[in-house]
Amino acid sequence: MSKQRTLKSIHLAGTFWFIVCVGYILVVALRQAGIKWWVLFSLSGHGVLIALLLISLYLFAIYRGISSSQKVRIEHPLTSTSYYAVFYVITPLLGGLAGCLGMIGISTVSQFVLGIAVGTLGTTFLVWVIIDPLAGLLEMLVLPASRKHCAERLALAKALRQSEQRNRERLLSEVLAKTESEQYRWREMLKPKAEKLATLISQIETDYTDKSVKSVECEAVSIGVDAWQIGGLACMQELRDMAIAIARQRNRNESVVDYVGAWWDGIGSWREPSLG
């Protein structure tokens, strides 16, 4: 555990050193192009937020990559070893050291520092972007055991995905079949109640006295409570749709006012539909 933490710390330090060197090279290049210091400060002021965000994401990706094993040892016998991991994380520092050795004899401080930065950039790019992916690819191409294990692993992953997909489809089919069966059972059970509701809708249209309205509402509420107890909101919705359909059929397909939505307001989780 201590070894892993040390490796992470070295990797973060090397990455920070790499970013500093890239920033230094960029500033030097802009200065050599004739960009004034106040322009550089202005650009950095506008871009500091984006730069910090990108650096943070990059460091997080690097930290996560080191914190978990990304390579299977049997497929990558070289690049998955601890010696290679150490070499990988100290690459920016080795590049800085190589640049320092290469600039021996240079008396100008700016040129000496620039040489170290260029050495860091070149070495890091060479190892992280070219050598590391190429080494992993060669391991897979050259070693028969690596190719065999990779093919088996990919086949197993594909089989697991297909199995999960089949399970999802089976569960979905079961849910749909259960819902269909439940709706059929409700239709058979609710048909008399739907017909009664349709009668109440017609009654309220023809007899709108206070006594009649209260009687109709009480009976409709009782039917709604029964539906809620049978199957909750879905059952109530099914019963309401059946009643409206029967009332419309009796009314020769003319429009029917949805009194049921108002009558059942407050029963369980039923709420009166908004007019808007």
Image (cartoon, rainbow, N blue to C red):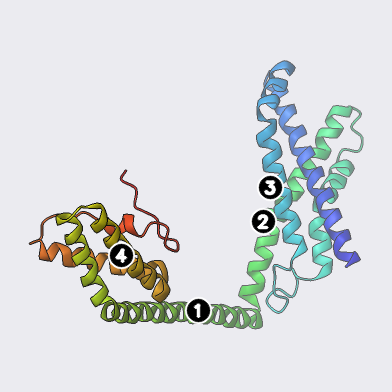
Q: Which mark is residue 57?
A: 3
* Residues packed near mark 1 inside 10 Å, few (<14), some (14 to 19) or many (20 plus): few
Quadrant of residue 257 within the rendered picture: bottom left
Q: CA distance from mark 3 to mark 1?
A: 32 Å
Q: Secondary structure at mark 3?
A: helix
Mark 4 vs mark 1, foreground winner is: 4
- Tell me which numbered mark, 4 or 3, is placed earlier along the sequence: 3
Question: Which quadrant: the N terminus?
Answer: bottom right
Q: Residue at x 26, y 81 (%)?
A: 188
The residue carrying mark 4 is 220
* Residues packed near mark 4 inside 10 Å, few (<14), some (14 to 19) or many (20 plus): many
Query: Mark 1: which amino acid?
Result: Glu
Q: Which mark is residue 164?
A: 1
Q: Residue 179 versus residue 52: which sits nearer the camera?
A: 179
- Tell me which numbered mark, 3 or 2, is placed earlier along the sequence: 3
Q: CA distance from mark 4 to mark 1?
A: 46 Å
- Tell me which numbered mark, 3 or 1, is placed earlier along the sequence: 3
Vertical placement of residue 245 versus 116, above or below: below
